[in-house]
Image (cartoon, rainbow, N blue to C red):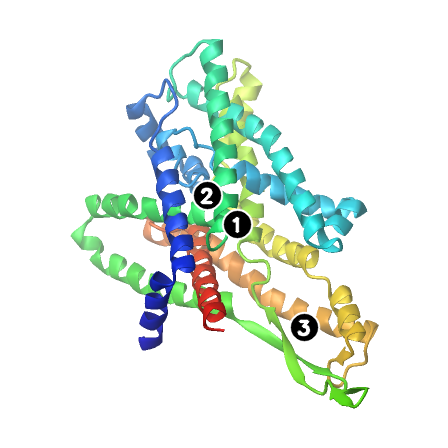
């Protein structure tokens, strides 16, 4: 505790670090201010009723950073940019040039890769914005507007999404932590008081044991999330001794830390992106004048987070995408080659292909634990709703993972900055 307060004091007495922290706070305040500016033609009463009865838009609201709950000019949030990044990651498996650009061309290649993601964000923001505006207009949340007003609304929400993407990159460059994650984190945290107030408003004395059980489970789950997010499997590495001139180099031992949750929260975002499509299409076609389209839309709307099929498919997709994203971002063959070039080896394992095979086996085993853990965290709110019947839960699995991951990452970045200052 003494060490924590000492580092906290250093963080606010060091001018450079203090400026970075204040810059992040300023951007987050600006973000929350933008989330209060609604687009033209919003029916507030209809919006509140619609969001209360629609859990699909509640999930979208997480990725908008809370901007969707007020239909603000940033109602799309950083969702289009996240979707764009996911698509670009998938394309690295199908387009060899993109894989080389992302993995082998260093910082310059990653910058170009990020630029492609930014460009892809624009059409995706247009598609998502148009779909949401059409759905909300059909539900009476947005008043019937002229074509010029509709184009204005679409331009506002697309520009708002691009602005948030830019603000997120500013935080990453001039502040501390990942800017996009910080924006989502700020939206989740800002919604917690409202969620708690709704829970207190619906408070029932007879359900007090359930509330206490929820509190105990929440503490255990948060502790488990922190523990497994930080958990690592060390792979020992030894550097061979080399004589250069009259000096002896190498002979040291270290380890490669393989994280159990190597993929982080990305598999849950991948899975949600796929599971949201049936409901988005259902919302679009349910008001169609064609009977078969309207019937199809109503059937798609039944596929939501209250059905057993949704929960099973959600768990399965998170499990599969954990392995998939780990395979995309971590290459045992490249790691084995780098170790061999630097005169390093894993004790008891021959260099080259045997080393790559060994790392792959270890990675597959720990990824199994990480995949099961992420899948359980993803469906935990669904299980809690089914067992208790309480639909108002302050933090879902995705939101909980994002909050914990962002806080841990921020603390690590601050500690690294303090360590650099002390050196």
Query: In this image, 48 relative to 76: left or right?
Result: left
Query: In this image, 413 relative to 28: left or right?
Result: right
Indicate the position of residue 378 as horizontal and vertical percent values.
Answer: 48, 53
Residue 226 image-quadrant placement: bottom left
- Identified at 44% across, 41% down, the residue is 59
The quarter of the picture where the N terminus appears is: bottom left
Q: Which residue is mark 3?
A: 362
Judge by depth and name the residue closer to the eye, 16 or 279.
16
SS for callout 2: loop
- Residue 173 image label: 1
Query: In this image, 384 relative to 365: left or right?
Result: left
- Identified at 50% across, 73% down, the residue is 423
Q: Which residue is mark 2?
A: 305
Judge by depth and name the residue closer to the eye, 124 or 385.
124
Give the residue at the far left of this rendering.
Answer: 205
How many neighbours does mark 3 have within 10 angstroms: few (below 14), some (14-19), or many (20 or more)?
some
SS for callout 1: helix
Mark 1–mark 2 Cα distance, whole angstroms, equals 37 Å
Q: Is residue 375 visible?
A: yes
Residue 246 image-quadrant placement: bottom right
Is 94 situated above or below 411?
above
Mark 3–mark 1 Cα distance, whole angstroms, equals 34 Å
Q: Nearer the viewer, mark 1 or mark 2?
A: 1
Indicate the position of residue 367 as horizontal and vertical percent values.
Answer: 62, 65
SS for callout 3: helix
Give the residue at the far top of this rendering.
Answer: 146
Q: Earlier in the sequence, mark 3 or mark 1?
A: 1
Q: Earlier in the sequence, mark 1 or mark 2?
A: 1
Q: Nearer the viewer, mark 2 or mark 3?
A: 3
- Identified at 61% across, 37% down, the residue is 118
Is 313 situated above or below 262?
above
- Identified at 76% across, 69% down, the residue is 338
């Amino acid at each position: 505790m003494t060490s924590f307060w000492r580092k906290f004091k250093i963080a606010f007495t060091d001018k450079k670090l203090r400026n970075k922290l204040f810059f992040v706070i300023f951007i987050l305040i600006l973000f929350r201010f933008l989330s209060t500016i609604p687009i033209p033609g919003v029916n507030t009463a209809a919006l509140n009723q619609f969001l209360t009865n629609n859990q699909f838009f509640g999930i979208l609201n997480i990725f908008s950073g809370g901007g969707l709950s007020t239909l603000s000019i940033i109602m799309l949030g950083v969702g289009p940019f996240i979707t764009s990044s996911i698509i670009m990651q998938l394309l690295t498996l199908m387009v060899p040039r993109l894989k080389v650009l992302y993995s082998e061309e260093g910082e310059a290649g990653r910058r170009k890769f990020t630029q492609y993601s930014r460009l892809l964000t624009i059409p995706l923001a247009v598609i998502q914005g148009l779909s949401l505006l059409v759905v909300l207009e059909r539900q009476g949340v947005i008043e019937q507007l002229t074509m010029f007003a509709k184009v204005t609304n679409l331009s506002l929400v697309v520009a708002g999404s691009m602005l948030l993407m830019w603000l997120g990159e500013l935080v990453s460059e001039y502040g501390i932590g990942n800017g996009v994650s910080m924006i989502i984190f700020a939206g989740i945290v800002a919604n917690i008081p409202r969620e708690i107030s709704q829970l207190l408003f619906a408070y029932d004395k007879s359900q007090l044991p359930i509330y206490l059980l929820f509190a105990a489970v929440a503490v255990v789950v948060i502790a488990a999330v922190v523990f497994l997010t930080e958990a690592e499997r060390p792979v020992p590495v030894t550097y061979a001794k080399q004589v250069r001139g009259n000096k002896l180099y190498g002979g040291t031992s270290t380890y490669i830390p393989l994280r159990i949750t190597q993929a982080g929260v990305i598999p849950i975002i991948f899975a949600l992106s796929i599971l949201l499509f049936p409901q988005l299409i259902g919302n679009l076609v349910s008001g169609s004048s064609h009977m078969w389209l309207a019937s199809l839309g109503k059937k798609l709307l039944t596929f939501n987070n209250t059905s057993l099929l949704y929960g099973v498919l959600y768990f399965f997709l998170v499990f599969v995408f954990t392995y998939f994203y780990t395979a995309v971002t971590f290459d045992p063959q490249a790691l084995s080659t780098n170790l061999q070039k630097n005169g390093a080896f894993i004790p008891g394992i021959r260099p080259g292909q045997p080393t790559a095979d060994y790392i792959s086996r270890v990675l597959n085993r720990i990824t199994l634990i990480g995949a099961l853990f992420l899948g359980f965290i993803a469906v935990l709110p669904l299980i809690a709703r089914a067992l208790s019947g309480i639909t108002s839960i302050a933090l879902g699995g995705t939101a909980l993972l994002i909050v914990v991951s962002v806080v841990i990452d921020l603390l690590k970045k601050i500690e690294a900055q303090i360590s650099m200052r002390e050196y």
